[in-house]
Amino acid sequence: MQSRFIDLESPRVRTHVFEAGPPGEDPPLMFVHGTAAFGAFLAPLMAQLDDVRMVAFDRPGFGLSGEFVYTEEKLRRTVVDGLGGVLDALGMEQIDLVGHSMGGYTSVLFALAHLERVRRLVLVGSVPTFPGTRPPIPLRLMTVPVLGRLIQRLQKPGEEGVLDFAETFGERESIQRHPALVRAMAAHQDDPQAVEAGLSEFKALFSARGWHSSVRIREEELRAIQQPTLVIWGENDPLGGPDDVRDGVDMIPDARFESATSGHVPFFAHPERSARLIREMRDTADAE
C-alpha cells in the first residue's frame, strides 16, 4: 500500500490518500467514506477486492487529513471539488466510484458534475438526503446548541463508545466482527479535529427538523444520472429502509437495487457479497 498527502486548492486543505492493489489497472476503484469516518473505514470491503487497483482518501477534517469545517452553504461544492482535486493530483481520468453514506452523497453529486470521469457508480448503504430518507433522531439532537455538546460529553470513551455509536446505525453486532476497525474508530473519535469536522458536517446536512432543503438530492438529479449504478441498501438502515427509497432508486435510469440484512453499513455483515456485486458490475463494464 502506498500513502501520500495532497494539498488541495479547493477546498484548501491537506488530504491523506492511499492506494492498494496491482498498479496500472484502469479504471481503479475509488472509495469515499462517510461522516465521522476515514478512508480505511471501508477496509472490510476493500480486503475482498485486493486484486483490484483501489484508491481511498481521508476526506477533509477526518483521518490524517487537515482540519476542516463544513457548512451548509458550501457543502455541495466542497464534496465535489475535494474528490475532483484528489483525482487531478493522482492523474486519474476515469474511475469506478464506490461511496458509503456521505461518501455516497459525494459520489452522486460528482457523477452528475463529471460524467466523463465516472464509469460506474456504486452506493453501499443509505445516502443522506436521498428521497425517502430522514436523519435518525439521536443525530438530530446533536445539532441542537448546548444539547449537542452535552450529548458529546456523555458519550462513552474508547471502544464502548464506538459500539454505542454503531448501535445508532444498526451495526453494533456487525462491527464487532472487525476488531481492528473498532480500535481505529476509537482512536479517531478521540481526535478533537475529527469530532468537530463530523459535527459540522451533520449541521451542514440537517437540523432537529430534518434535512436542509438546500442540500437534498433532488428527483431530477436522480433522473439525470447516466452511469450504470449499483445500490446496496440495508433492510434495517435507520435513515430509511428499501421500501422507503425504492421509488427514488427507480428514478435512476440504469440502476440495480440490492437489499441486505444489515443496518447502515452493509459491508460489515456482508463484505463478500458486496464485493461480488461490485465485481459483477465491473465485469459488465469491461465486456462492453
Image (cartoon, rainbow, N blue to C red):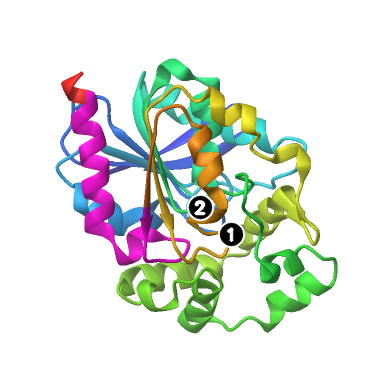
Which residue is at a point 58% across and 59% down the rendered structure image? 239
Where is residue 94? Give x, y as percent: 35, 21
Along the horizontal axis of the image, is 22 left or right of 88? left
> Circle 2 is placed at which residue position?
126
Q: How many marks?
A: 2
The residue to which callout 1 is attached is 239
Query: Type of residue at label 1?
Result: Leu
Q: Judge by depth and name the residue closer to the eye, 7 or 48.
A: 48
Quarter holding residue 44: bottom left
In this rendering, is residue 234 above or below 178? above
Residue 192 place in picture, x, y as percent: 63, 64
Q: Which type of secondary structure does the marked residue at label 2 adopt?
A: loop
Between 247 and 12, the one nearer to me in the picture: 247
Mark 2 neighbour density, 10 Å: few (under 14) some (14–19) many (20 or more): many
Which picture quadrant has residue 231? Answer: top left
Q: Position of residue 281 (x, y in %)?
A: 26, 35
At a point 32% along the width and 75% down the height, the residue shown is 179
Report the front residue among 75 and 67. 75
Residue at the location (46% across, 27% down)? 253
Q: Amino acid at mark 2?
A: Ser
Q: Is residue 1 visible?
A: no
* Residue extent of the magenta highlight: 259-285
Q: Is residue 109 magenta?
A: no
Q: What is the C-alpha distance between the residues marked 1 and 2?
A: 7 Å
Q: Is residue 123 above or below residue 281?
A: below
Q: Are marks 1 and 2 in contact (CB under 8 Å)?
A: yes
